[in-house]
Amino acid sequence: MRLRVSRSKLAVVMPLMICVVLNALVRPWLADGLGGKTVRSGASVRGSDRWWTFDAQTQVDHPVLTAFLHLSDGALAMLTFAVIAVLLIGIWVTDQLRSPRLRPDKKRTG
């Protein structure tokens, strides 16, 4: 039994999985390690948006991590959807370029 997964399904599922793991596990762990203060905005059915703030010294010591953690969960999700769109468009373009089709110079004779 062989499991076959299409490229388009992987292009959707993998970025979503990565985003969920980042937002649920990695980012809170990093923020706790750097001593970040959690900021939450809004409260709806889907939950609140979350990001972290840091003191000036931590921002100087870890500029990339603090900038990454200052992005909200929602912003990271929107970035993930943009990546998915680019991947799906890339898959569609490569499929179009690879597919055999009749060119105007090679007409079918019958």
Image (cartoon, rainbow, N blue to C red):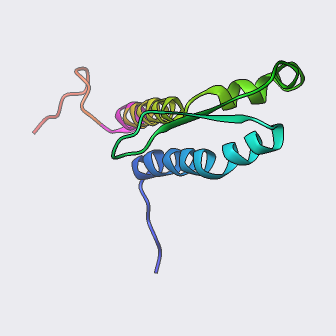
Residue at x-position 90% and y-position 24%:
61
x then y, percent, for residue 66 = 75, 27
Question: Is residue 17 depicted above or below 98 in this figure?
Answer: below
> What secondary structure is the stretch in magenta mostly built from?
helix
Residue at x-position 53% and y-position 52%:
17
Residue at x-position 44% and y-position 60%:
5
x then y, percent, for residue 24 = 59, 50
Most extreme residue toward the left, as rendered?
110
Q: Is residue 97 magenta?
A: yes
Most extreme residue toward the bottom, as rendered?
1
Question: Is residue 4 depicted above or below 20 in this figure?
Answer: below
Residue at x-position 51% and y-position 29%:
75
x then y, percent, for residue 11 = 46, 45
Point out the stretch of residues depicted in magenta: 93-100
Count of marks placed on residues? 0
- Of 5 and 37, nearer the camera is 37
Q: Is residue 14 magenta?
A: no
Which quadrant, please, contains the C terminus? top left
x then y, percent, for residue 106 = 25, 27
- Of 37 and 75, nearer the camera is 37
- Of 3 and 18, nearer the camera is 18
Query: Would you identify the image quadrant in which residue 50 lies?
Result: top right
Seen in the image, is 98 located left or right of residue 65?
left
